[in-house]
Amino acid sequence: MEFFKRLTNLEIYDHSYFALGYRNPKFYNDTASRIDEIITPNSNSMPKKVILYAPKSLKEFRATHIMSKFLFDEVVFNESSLENFDVSDFDTIIFPKFTFIGKNRVKSLNISGISAHRTLDKFPLMSNLTTLRMSKAKLFRIFNESSSHIGIFNWAPNVEHLDLSKNFMWVLNKRFLDGLKHLKYLNLQGNLFQTVPEVVTSLTNINKIDLSFNLLPTLDENMRGWIDRQQKKLGKFEVFLVLNPFLCHCETVSFLYWIRSTNANLDCDGNYTCRLDANHVSHTLNVYEKIHDFYSDCNGILWLKFGVSLLTCISILTIFATLLYNFRWRLIFFCQRKFLKMAEKSLNVDFKYDVYVSYSDDGVSFIKNFLQPKIEQEWGLTLCCEDRDFFIGESIVDARAASIHESRHIIFLVTPSFRENEWSSFEIERAKYEKFSRDLQKIIVIAKGIATKDMPIEFATVWKDVSLIEWPIDVDGINMSCQKLRLSFFY
């Protein structure tokens, strides 16, 4: 560090691609009585703050792709002239807080490849920052939350180029980009948007947006109008839309006309792959050239659909009004009773656990090594496991019954030895009881290493209330099953 301070003419410092040490080193203790007893280095003596006296001439600092047992809570740059700061893919035990003594001159910051939860509140106000890259930062974990992180870019109010690519986002809260009044380029490439987030149209200075590699079937009228207004206002507007699953049918004809009429600059000259039907794929320009051949009867179809829909609605409303009039008093009394029961029931609901898990001996490893960390550490839910949460000396019957009663959902991990577990049938019957008479919300069955036809017959009476997940072997299948499991808790 003293040597670093004395490099008075240094302008660029690159300390990247270093595996400085294992994050969790373990050392064998030959004095231990058992071979599996280990010791780990004591980190209590490590300093919590390090001050870097960077050379005044240093303009660019890069420390990327670091694998380290870095334990500093804070890194201070003293009187720094830094303009470009890159700490992307900084894989350490602790992501430090960065502090700048004196004027902060940083114009470009790259924190890609780091979970956004770790970088929140770790940077001071950066008034000169114009470029911020947060690619592959797992932003979906933040942007899909309600309001806990509104305006998370307030520390960078003058950003003009913002990279949020490859973050697997499918929605954006209207206020997550609050304060970015100077934003000119927004990169949303490689996400899961099926419609362009409404918040984008509130950014009035944007002249370039990348929406490629998403799930857009079309651009709606509101988005198309905003692009044209920005083009007219700013004189130039660039849009990247390649590799979206666009659809070419009657409902998207206006999008095809817009591609040929807009003055905005489109990538691929507006010639995108689009699907005509389940078996045919074409390109938007080819379809536009023969648009009358493809969609000459669209108006007739639309009027036919409108007429059928109108007639159906009138019929349904007539039947509904007749039933409502004839049974009006019964319906009033029924709704009143239901409302009173729900109100009384809600007063007594107090779940201790989010999920109770039922499993046999061959499922213990899967629960401890995969399911428990996934549900509790990643998803933030509380899990009730027999091996961990049951007290010694307590009646096993009472413990199981009480735990299921105090759980919002129940998971049955059905493995080859599940039937042999003496408590499986009891837990299934208890789950049925809680489902039909109390507040158990979801019964989830995970079939692991067992065919559906071999499932216990006790599930037969509740199949309509069961969410079944057949656990795969391949990694992609496991990721999809995890997503399905997580959605099962909320939908």
Image (spheres, rainbow, N blue to C red):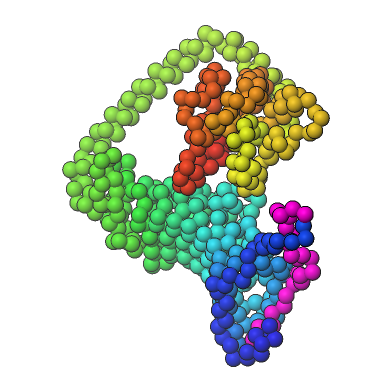
**Residue 151, image x, y percentages:** 62, 57
372 sits left or right of 454 in the view: right
Q: Quadrant of the N terminus?
A: bottom right
Which residue is found at the position 75% from the left and 26% from the top?
396
Answer whether residue 359 is magenta in the image: no
Q: Which range of residues does the magenta coloring cover?
A: 33-56
**Residue 350 vs residue 365, the one in the foreground:** 365
232 over 347 or under it: above or below: below
Residue at 61 percent of width and 71 percent of height: 20
Q: Nearer the viewer, residue 16 or 161?
A: 16
Q: What type of secondary structure mainly makes up the magenta span?
A: loop
Q: Is residue 238 left or right of residue 436?
A: left
The image quadrant that residue 16 belongs to is bottom right
Q: Residue furthest top?
A: 326
Residue found at the far right of this picture: 393
Q: Nearer the viewer, residue 115 or 473?
A: 473
Query: Quadrant of residue 23 in the image?
Result: bottom right
| Residue 453 visible in the displayed image | yes
User: What percent of the width, then of the height, locates residue 36?
Assistant: 70, 53
Quarter of the view holding residue 306: top left
Q: Is residue 276 left or right of residue 465?
A: left
Q: Is residue 228 above or below residue 377?
A: below
